Each structure stands twice: as C-alpha cells, then as structure tokens.
Image (spheres, coloured by chain):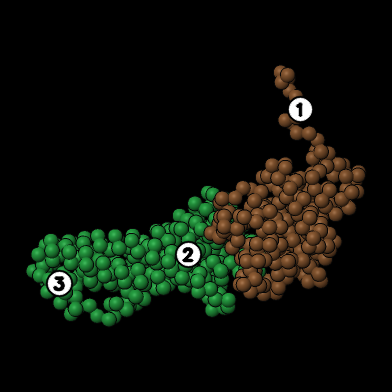
Amino acid sequence: MITMRGVEKGFGQQEVLRGVDLEIPPGQLTTIIGPSGEGKSVLLKHMIGLLKPDRGEVWVDGVEISRLRGPSLDKVRKRFAMLFQSAALFDSMNVFDNVAFPLREKRLASESKVPRMVNDMLERVGLGEMGHKFPAELSGGMKKRAGLARALVVGPEIILFDEPTTGLDPLMARTIHNLIRSMHQVFGFTAIMVSHQVPDIFPISDWVAMLKHGKIIAMARSRDFQGLTDPVVREFVLAGEMPGPSSVEGPGQN
Amino acid sequence: MKVLIYIGSSTLSLLEEIGRMFLFLLQAIAWIFRPPFRPARILNQLYFIGFKTTFVVTLTAIFTGMVLALQGYYSLRKFGAEGLLGSAVALGMIRELGPVLGSLMVTARSGSAMTAEIGIMRITEQIDAMETMAVNPIQYLIAPKIVAGVMAVPLLVAIFDIVGIFGGYLVGVKLLGVSSGSFWSSIESEVGWSDVYGGFLKSISFGLIVTWVCCYKGFYTEMSAEGLGKATTQGVVLSSVLILVWDYFLTSVLL
C-alpha cells in the first residue's frame, strides 16, 4: 500500500502541496482528479521518489521512501513503472528498443528472451508491427501505447499514469482508458492515475480522489464519487459532464 | 540596502552553482568505475565527439597552420631566421594552438549538441523515465560522454597538430620558398617530448572541461525552449572561457 502523510511541497514562493494525506488501496485502480495546475503530477512524482517532499512522509509497503537515495531507492523503484504525460519514449531508440530498455538495463531477461517478451507486449497494446518505428514517426495515441508497453513489460507491482490521455482525441482517449483498465484486470497491478477526464475515468476506476488547493478533499469508491455532496466536488464533476461550447447553438447558426 | 541584498543573493547563487557543478563532476567520475559498464555507449560517443568532429578540426587546423606560417615568416625574416619557421609553426601548434583551438572546435561542434540533447531529454521527461526504471541517468548518459571526451579530444588535437604543421609546410616551403630540409630539421631539433607532453596534458583536461560543462548545463536546463537555448549558449560560452583560463594556469605550471 502507498500512504502519504502530511506531504507538503513548494517551488520557490509557490506552495503546491499543502499537507496531502492519502492511502492508495493495493491492487486497485485509483484515479486522482483535480483542476489543472493543482499539483497532481507533482503528487504522483512523490510516490516514486522523483520529487522529495519539503515536509511529510511517503510510505510504500512499510518503507518510508522520501528520504531514500541511491540503491535503496532503486530497490523500491524496481517495483514501479510509470507512464508519463508525454510517454517519455527515448528519441534515439525505436519502439522495440524502448520497450526492451528496462529489461536489458535491469537484466530482467536474457538477450535471447527479450524479443519474445517485447513483441508479446507490443501485440497486447496493439503495436505488433510498429517495433521498428521511431517515436517521431508515431501518433500521440501510439506513443502512449508504446509507453504503456514499456511500463508493463517488467511486470511491475505498481504503475503510475500521469495524464495518459492528454492531447488525444476523445475516441483515442477512451481507447487508452479501456486499454489501461483491461491491462489492470489482466496483470492485477496497483494503478494510480492522474487525470481530469471527467466523467470518462469513472467507469474504469475503482477509487477516485480529488486534489484541490494542495490537499485531498475527497476520496470515495468510483460509483459513489459522483454522488458526493461536497460543493467543490459537485462543481468539478458537473463541469466535466456538461456539453462543450461547440454543441451549443449560437445566434445565427441555423 | 537593496544593492547589498542583490550582491549577497547573487554570490550565494554563484557558490551554489559552483558546488553543484563540482558534485555533478564527482558523481559522473564515480559512476565511470561502477558496474554495469557500457563500452558500446562509450564507442558511440567516441564516434559522435571524435569522428564527427574530425572534418571541422582538420579544416581549422590547415588554415591555422597556414596563417601561422605566414605570420611567422614575416617576423622571422626581420631577423634572417626563416630557417626556424618549421619549429615556430610546430611549437605554436603543439604547445598552444592545437589543444586550445581543437578543443574550442569540439565545444562548438559536439559540446553544444551534447547540451541540447541532454536538455531535450530533461524537458521531455526522458531522464525522469530513466530514473523511474532505476537506471542512473548520470551513469547512463553523462559518464560515457566524459570518458569519450577525455579520449577523443587528445586524438583530435593530435590530428590538429599534424594537419596544422602540414599547412605551415605548404605555405612556408611551397609558397614562400623556405627550404624543406631546414623546415623539418628545425622541428626535429627544437620540438621536445616535454612540448608534446604539455599539449597532450592540456587536451585531456580540455576534453574533461567541455564534456563536464556542456553535460551539466543540459542536465540542469530550465524546463522551456527558451531555457534550453540559454543552457546551450551558457554551455558553449562557459566551456570556452574555462578552456582559456585553465590554459593560462596550466601553461604557467608547465613552462
């Protein structure tokens, strides 16, 4: 289980996290929602030790990771994988080598087994024929799939998803959400996803938490979250459910 | 009062930056000697820093040697010592111009590219991705570049020296009519091992300076396109200035 206690983080004069208390249930898909610029990605990066809190603690299965460095932190990180907002594929490598990278660098598989493992994972995410392509040749959705394959190939216990559908069209966003959900069901990892894609995240999430003003202001099972009466939560959820301006007919549009 | 605060905070920032730069170098050097070793990445960087810079180094060297011969001939003729042109060109190239200009060319060609490459990896979260995979980015990205820089720059400087002397020969012997025998014999009699050793030592330290400074600037770039542009400029300017400053101190010790 990942537990955050009183996590505070600031950058210069700007306070981003102001005492986050959060418990992530193991084996479940938890989504953290909230307005842009509230520090959702910052929160996620604390869970894997990419950022250190100014105050507070981050526990991963009984290990306080916020003060760990070097090999002890690497030991914890080996249980994690992360899908970044931009997919963060290595430009200089093709898709195959990107997916093979953690296997080779962590020596998780012998070189003879790597092609089978990589190709199998690429098939699963629908990129079976794309191994030879470079990131610059892929669409946004394909990059996310390749990033997902790279995250899954090491068989992690915990995967962090940093706004995995940002920049994608609604159809592709739904495809990526469904892919995450199905992979979660197949592999059973603990998933923590940061998103503001309301209401799309409700059907795929087990738990939903909301970050606002640097704190977790609500957390509930996904099916219950939309029924919460907190006015800030209601406003955010309803704003996501409302039709966009393009569907509203303006004067003279007839 | 505001001026004092400004001076104080600027001094603290500068000291912090210097400290961080040295820590970065120490970490990179420490990671060179820790497994896993990646010889393929070092070879790749040798190709990038060394082989791909050969053309520009050769071009610069030949013209440097040519102009050195022209200027040397003009000065030596006043004393009737044209016969020493070969040693004047060779000593100038081996002791000073080869290491300094060769390293400045490496800075311009490869140093700027290193800063940009690492900076883009930082901005697009590729370095963060590496860390999440428990792969140390300083060991994976920086250490091979530093090893390759320290190996490639002396080799490039050797090419610079040879091509530069040949350029001096073309102008001095073929164009200005200095005797070929006196050109080469003056080199043989005047250039000693200590001259070659000094130039070699300089080129190793310059190779370290270029890769260290340029990698550091890329690694800690600001997270914007403007910030990356600034980091690249700073990397090239700071490397060039440090090469010239270090050259003075090293020369004063070696003389």
Q: What residue lies at 63% left-to-right and 52% top-to-bottom?
A: A143
User: Quadrant of the rendered structure where residue B79 is?
Assistant: bottom left
Give the numbered dot on residue B213: 2
Spatial separation of the CA atoms under disc 2 and disc 1: 56 Å
The residue lying toward the viewer, choosing from B4 and A178, is A178
Residue holding disc 3: B183
Residue A163 location (% of width, % of height): 71, 51
Q: Which residue is rendered at x = 33% and y = 69% of the image?
A: B157
Q: Chain of mark 3?
A: B
Q: Position of residue B128 (x, y in %)?
A: 63, 61
Q: Quadrant of residue A162?
A: bottom right
Camera-nearest residue between A31 and B176:
A31
In the image, which disc is placed on residue A161? Answer: none
Which corner quadrant holds the N terminus of chain A?
A: bottom right
User: What amino acid is found at the position of numbered circle 3 in the picture?
Assistant: Phe
Discs 2, 1: same chain: no
Do circles 1 and 3 both sit on a common chain?
A: no
Which of the two discs, 1 and 3, sits closer to the camera?
1
Chain B rendered in what hue?
Answer: green
Question: Residue B241: in sight, yes or no?
Answer: no
